[in-house]
């Protein structure tokens, strides 16, 4: 059994706090010889942190743009899922963006990103956000808005494509019904649309109306918010 899970708001409480339940999930997974793979919009540098501080073997970071995993010697290996040309286009676009909008608030973790960059949109007003998003459209740069950032990238990136590649290349023995995904927000939608076993933790209720594709299972009640919902669910499997 393998559990893929979003991080912010799904494995953390209200997108901020690492609670006891997160560590209970890690214990449960270990005890039952299962695996947890974090699938997050956070940066590759966060992926390094996850792999060095938690008992995980792999993470899929930057919204599916890059896989990082521990090899047989315990060294971290990074595998970007977009081409070197697309990475270069992204670097050039970021320079152009900063030239046009010198005060655009790039996220503090943008320097630790490889396949995308992020903007702290809560520091911008609506009109400015629209201007920047129009500029991205004009330059054919992809973007999405999560509950924390506007992420932008070049090439074809989604959480689903990252998970699909990871399963085909690194865990080919796993069957669809042995895999579950947990999420809480619109940036998990590609997984809700295309992955068979998907679960929304109960705090997803705040954004259900924004989703064209909903998770197959939607948890309810305060006791099933974030990591508590994940823990309760995997205990019953
Ligand atoms: Mg989330």
Image: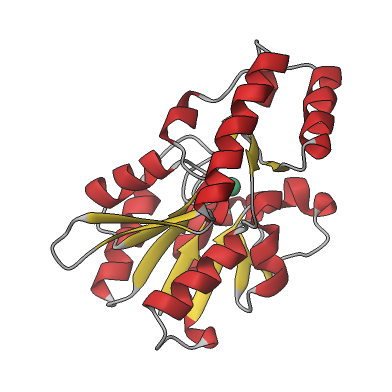
Residue 18 % position (x, y)? 39, 41
For residue 66, above or below residue 198: above
Residue 56 shows up from this direction? yes
Coloration mode: secondary structure
Instruction: Depth check: give the residue in front, 193 or 223.
Output: 193
Instruction: Depth check: give the residue in front, 222 or 82.
Output: 82
Residue at image position (62%, 70%) is 198
For residue 152, above or below residue 160: above
For residue 191, above or below residue 32: above
- The image quadrant of residue 118 is top right
Furthest toward the left, the residue is 73
Instruction: Depth check: give the residue in front, 100 or 111.
Output: 100
Residue at image position (65%, 39%) is 152
Residue at image position (63%, 74%) is 195
Residue 5 % position (x, y)? 49, 60
**Image quadrant occupied by the N terminus:** bottom left
Tell me: 83 left or right of 98: left
Residue at image position (66%, 51%) is 187
- The image quadrant of residue 93 is top right
Instruction: Depth check: give the residue in front, 22 or 127.
Output: 127
Tell me: 96 left or right of 112: right
Furthest toward the top, the residue is 103
Furthest toward the front, the residue is 85
Residue 151 % position (x, y)? 63, 38
Residue 235 shows up from this direction? no
Tell me: 59 left or right of 138: left
Please tell me how many numbered marks the rendered image carries: 0
């Amino acid at each position: 059994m393998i559990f893929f899970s979003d991080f912010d708001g799904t494995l953390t409480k209200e997108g901020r706090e690492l609670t006891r339940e997160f560590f209970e999930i890690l214990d449960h997974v270990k005890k039952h010889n299962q695996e947890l793979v974090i699938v997050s919009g956070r940066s590759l540098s966060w992926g390094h942190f996850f792999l060095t501080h938690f008992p995980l073997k792999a993470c899929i970071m930057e919204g599916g743009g890059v896989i990082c995993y521990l090899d047989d010697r315990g060294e971290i290996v990074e595998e970007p899922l977009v081409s070197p040309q697309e990475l270069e286009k992204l670097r050039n676009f970021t320079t152009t963006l900063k030239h046009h909008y010198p005060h655009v608030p790039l996220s503090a973790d943008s320097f630790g990103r490889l396949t995308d960059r992020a903007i702290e949109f809560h520091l911008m007003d609506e009109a400015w956000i629209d201007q920047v998003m129009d500029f991205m459209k004009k330059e054919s740069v992809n973007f999405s808005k999560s509950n924390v950032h506007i992420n932008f990238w070049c090439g074809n990136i989604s959480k689903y494509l990252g998970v699909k590649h990871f399963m085909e290349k690194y865990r080919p023995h796993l069957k669809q019904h042995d895999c579950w995904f947990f999420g809480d927000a619109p940036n998990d939608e590609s997984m809700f649309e295309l992955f068979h076993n998907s679960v929304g933790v109960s705090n997803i209720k705040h954004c259900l109306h924004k989703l064209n594709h909903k998770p197959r299972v939607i948890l309810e009640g305060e006791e099933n918010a974030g990591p508590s919902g994940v823990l309760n669910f995997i205990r019953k499997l």
